[in-house]
Image (cartoon, rainbow, N blue to C red):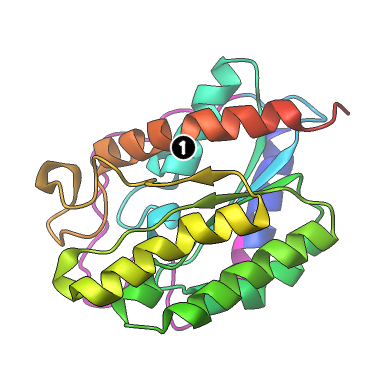
Amino acid sequence: MRFAVAVLALVFALACKDERAPQRNLPGDGPARVETPAPKAPEIPPGSPTVVFLGDSITAGLHLAADLAFPAVLQRELAAEGLPFVLVNAGVSGDTSSGGETRIDYILENKPDLVVIELGGNDGLRGQPTDVVDANLRSLIYKCRAKYVPVILLGVQLPPSLGPDYVAQFDALFPRLAAQESVPFVPKFMEGVGGVPEMNLPDGLHPTAKGHERIAQNVLPKLREELKRLPKR
């Protein structure tokens, strides 16, 4: 079963690879920093649902071993609770809501059971108009819904240094979208990590292993809830 999971993850990783923004060791970033040995992946029984995490470098776990990124932490936590799932980490460093929108069709062809969307942070850092980000995220939700695939939306917040007006517009985008589209929502998925020096690597942007553990705890209740809602196979 672990071989099958590895093959599935590899297929998704190759399909989702962005040549402009590889998932590991970006030029100039220096060597990857693996803070602790990667823990053993849990045994996933046949028939477990497949959960795709569609995101950017936070989802990808930039500078860390893949098993230390928050999607893998969630997989271990929920498997231990009796809610195992096949993990597909479709995080691509540098990706935007537009990039995710171009990748979602292929992802849906592989018939996942649930998609967790973690996108928009790079849009905000680049000053992308909020109506463009809204349209891209809305398109992701619509495309998943058209294939009867439920979605969890993770809310992104920007640092105040980007300007109060833009930050206010951007921060309001995610809860408004979640409410309008009635999708499960984690309002501040990086709460306790973003802007906290000890939870981030020296670049100040990418979480440490401890930071990813905190993110996993922020997302865990909503993911647990949605996994329980999935029809039994």
94 and 164: which is toward the camera? 164
Q: Taking 144 as reference, is 189 above or below it?
A: above
* Percent x, y of residue 148: 84, 52
**Residue at image coords 39%, 83%:** 128
Q: Taking 215 as reference, is 197 above or below it?
A: below
Q: Taking 206 as reference, is 68 above or below it?
A: above
**Residue at image coords 42%, 47%:** 187
Q: Is residue 117 magenta?
A: no
Tell me, yes or no, if residue 154 can be seen here.
yes
* Percent x, y of residue 227: 68, 31
* Screen quadrant of the N terminus: top right
Tell me, yes or no, if residue 56 can be seen here.
no
Q: Mark 1 — residue?
A: 219
Q: Residue furthest top?
A: 81
* Percent x, y of residue 161: 14, 70
Mark 1: few/some/many CA within 10 Å (<14, 14-19, 20+): many
* Screen quadrant of the C terminus: top right
* Percent x, y of residue 67: 44, 40
Q: Which residues are magenta?
A: 13-42
